């Protein structure tokens, strides 16, 4: 039996197929309909969610790639549920903000990104999580590249290079963790992290790779330079998703991955992270003040997280 979380993830993909199949003029209504179905499933999660429980809820576990101990493992806690609900809230406004005559490709790509966002916020295994994480970045790149405004090629390329290089570092770090510990399961790795997941130089290399990959996505200063160009060039609806949901993937990664897996490293670099935060607090408003484009102004202000 398909669980609620699986339904939430795959309904938008079915919607993308439906949008591509039906007549062009029906693209937005169909996209909104499938979004409403996913939102209803998300509300079902919220309705049945036990706020007093501390463990993951609505867990679905299926064998996937036994050779590397990778499972289809999804579940939600309070943080995941909030982000799932946030995604369900913002995506329909993004559809309404960008009416495109005959724009089936736009709506289908947005639905694919919505599915990937749901998967990112609910996956509990790194292989599955990384698949959804990257799956969300490709539609974002295409939405900027194809439907963006002036200088869209430059903005899309910059977005792709930053996020791709960050993802490579994160992937290499988790491969190192897997070869050392033999698992991709977040819960198991978090339990091991309490006593030191890795030791010595390997621990710092793995920490650095994951940190940079997530810092680019937040984005933290000084990894934020892709943000103004992407916001300015992207369609309004895409900019809404970038600032409202996509950037939350990085923050979610810090809470879900970096802090539980590397608590000792976080304690050591904590003061330096505060320095980066102060730099963002000082730099972002000044940069926003100097802008003449509203989207670029919002981009700089959105980096204040």
Image: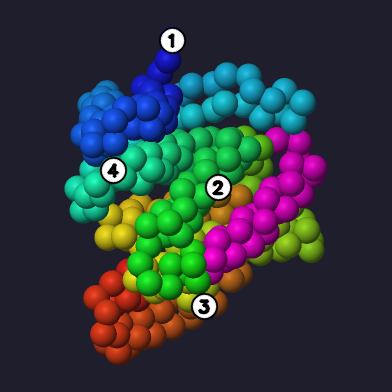
Q: Which residue is mark 4?
A: 102
Instruction: Please name whichever residue, 239 or 301, is drawn nearer the observer in this view of the structure.
Output: 239
Chief secondary structure of the magenta span?
A: helix
Q: Earlier in the sequence, mark 1 or mark 3?
A: 1
**Badge 4 density bin: few <14, some 14–19, many ≥20, Cα 10 Å:** some
Separation of marks 2 and 3 at Cα, in angstroms: 22 Å
**Badge 1 density bin: few <14, some 14–19, many ≥20, Cα 10 Å:** few
The disc at residue 134 is: 2
**Badge 3 density bin: few <14, some 14–19, many ≥20, Cα 10 Å:** few
Q: Residue at x 24, y 53 (%)?
A: 98
The disc at residue 1 is: 1
Magenta stretch, residue numbers: 157-183
Instruction: Examine the rendering and report whether any part of residue 90 can be seen.
Output: no
Q: Quadrant of the C terminus?
A: bottom left
Camera-nearest label, 2 or 1 = 2
Separation of marks 4 and 1 at Cα, in angstroms: 36 Å
Q: Are marks 4 and 1 in contact (CB under 8 Å)?
A: no
Q: Residue at x 61, y 58 (%)?
A: 164
Instruction: Please name whichever residue, 229 or 263, is drawn nearer the observer in this view of the structure.
Output: 229
Q: Are marks 3 and 4 in contact (CB under 8 Å)?
A: no
Separation of marks 4 and 2 at Cα, in angstroms: 27 Å
Q: Quadrant of the N terminus?
A: top left
Q: Are marks 2 and 3 in contact (CB under 8 Å)?
A: no
Q: Are marks 4 and 2 in contact (CB under 8 Å)?
A: no
């Amino acid at each position: 039996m398909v669980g609620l979380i699986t339904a939430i993830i795959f309904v938008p993909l079915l919607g993308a197929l439906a949008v591509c199949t039906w007549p062009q003029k029906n693209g937005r209504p169909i996209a909104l309909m499938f979004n409403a179905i996913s939102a209803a499933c998300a509300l079902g999660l919220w309705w049945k969610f036990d706020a007093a429980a501390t463990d993951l809820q609505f867990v679905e576990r299926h064998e996937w790639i036994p050779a590397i101990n990778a499972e289809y493992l999804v579940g939600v806690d309070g943080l995941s549920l909030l982000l799932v609900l946030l995604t369900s809230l913002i995506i329909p406004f993004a559809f309404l903000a960008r009416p495109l005559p005959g724009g089936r490709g736009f709506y289908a790509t947005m639905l694919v990104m919505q599915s990937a966002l749901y998967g990112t916020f609910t996956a509990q295994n790194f292989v599955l999580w990384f698949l959804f994480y990257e799956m969300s970045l490709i539609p974002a790149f295409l939405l900027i590249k194809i439907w963006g405004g002036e200088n869209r090629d430059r903005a899309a390329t910059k977005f792709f290079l930053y996020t791709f290089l960050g993802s490579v570092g994160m992937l290499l770090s988790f491969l190192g963790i897997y070869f050392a510990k033999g698992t991709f399961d977040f819960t198991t790795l978090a339990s091991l992290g309490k006593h030191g997941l890795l030791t010595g130089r390997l621990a710092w290399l793995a920490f650095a790779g994951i940190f940079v990959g997530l810092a680019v996505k937040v984005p933290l200063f000084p990894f934020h330079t892709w943000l103004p160009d992407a916001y300015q060039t992207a369609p309004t609806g895409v900019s809404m998703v970038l600032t409202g949901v996509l950037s939350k993937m990085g923050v979610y990664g810090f809470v879900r991955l970096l802090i539980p897996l590397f608590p000792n490293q976080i304690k050591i670099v904590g003061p330096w992270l505060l320095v980066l935060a102060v730099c963002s607090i000082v730099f972002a408003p000044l940069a926003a003040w100097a802008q003449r484009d509203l989207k670029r102004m919002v981009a700089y202000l959105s980096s204040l997280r």
